[in-house]
Amino acid sequence: MRIRKIALYILVISLGFIACKKNDVPTAVPDRDRGEQQIIDNDSILGYLETHYYNSSAFGASNLNPSLMDLEISALPEDGVLPDPDNNTLLINAVETISTVFAETDYVFYILKLNQGGGDSPKFCDRVRVNYEGSLLNDNLFDSTVNPVTFDLLGLVPGWHKAIPYFSTSEGFNDVGDGTIDFYNFGLGVLFFPSGLGYFSGATINIPSYSPLIFKIELFQMAQNDDDNDGVPSFMEDLNNDGEFTVEFDDTDGDLIPNYVDVDDDGDGKLTSKEIIVTTYNETTKEAIENLPLEADQVLIKIKTELDGTFTGTVITLYDSDGNGIPNYLDKNK
């Protein structure tokens, strides 16, 4: 009798365990519709912009070299009245509204541009050197830098490679002498992204799923990427100019390798680097490089400032042997 009870007890526990295992199998939760989530996120961002202001008088002609340390963003008081309107501005009245497309969805994001920057503007696929602070709409800080860091824009959330090209790098820098560099007249601003240009359904310890994001950024330097080292800058291998690399639109030879990482773009057995010519020119002024007399098949792709104060321009020649409007490196028949 005792043995039977024990056996029965074990059987009940076993069945219960099996039942629990079956019921505890996690069910995959499908992602929300991107278009619907964009509407929700945009309303949330607008709510933030309409109820927060910044110290606008700290920027402009009164501050020739502004930084993030000068910026203060505050919530409106309970009465909803903007304090000291001569020195403060509502964010909603200062931001630029930018429309873009990502993942076949129409998106809107916002930029508070505090300083354009005196250097070059990076392309969506370049590397950048920045300082930044990342926060949520509740002002909780989830990430920040103390010293400048370098990123490949395509390695970040989509909003970065959509927004950063609207800024320019620093005009220059001074070597302070203690191992630090002092940049001046650099790109400075605040980016407001919907979750679809951030982590969307993904989540981290400090960032819940479907969270709009705020990034305060300082843009110091950029470097042009040529991911496959074929002589054609990566940005020129975005064939439909949509700011993304896809097999559908940016794979000339149909080998399922987008051109920006394909060393033989047209699949004719000749390396792309052998079907173009790269030439450099050195001049004493940047203007002289910008005004180089170029042929119809030549493109000035970058200008580098040398240590001696001169400027080097890089020009690529995209030969089109048969004159059909398709350069040889994209024409399988040439």
Image: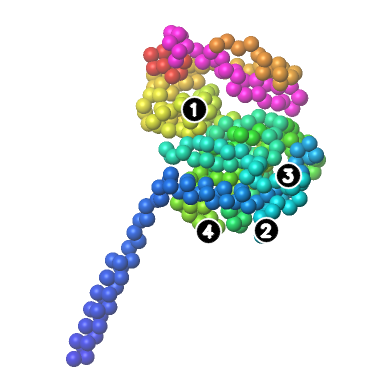
Of the residues under marks 3 and 1, which one precedes in the sequence?
Answer: 3
Query: Residue 176: horizontal and vertical position, in percent?
Result: 80, 40
Circle 2: is it few (<14), some (14-19), or many (20+) Cα within 10 Å? few
- Which stretch did the figure color magenta? 297-326
Q: Are marks 3 and 2 in contact (CB under 8 Å)?
A: no
Q: Nearer the viewer, mark 3 or mark 2?
A: 2
Q: Where does residue 241 sit, x and y in percent of width and height?
A: 49, 27
Q: Earlier in the sequence, mark 3 or mark 4?
A: 3
Q: Is residue 146 magenta?
A: no
> What separation in Å lies between label 3 and label 4 (alpha carbons)?
33 Å
Where does the N terminus fall, quadrant-wise? bottom left
Observer-side mark, 2 or 1, equals 2
- Foreground disc of the pair 3, 4: 3
Pointer 3 local density, CA inside 10 Å: few below 14, some 14–19, many at least 20: many
Name the amino acid type tagged 3: Ser
Q: CA distance from mark 4 to mark 2?
A: 34 Å
Give the residue drawn at x 52%, y 28%.
Answer: 234
Q: Amino acid at mark 1?
A: Asn
Q: Which mark is residue 79?
A: 2
Q: Which residue is mark 1?
A: 241
Marks 3,1: beta carbons within 8 A: no
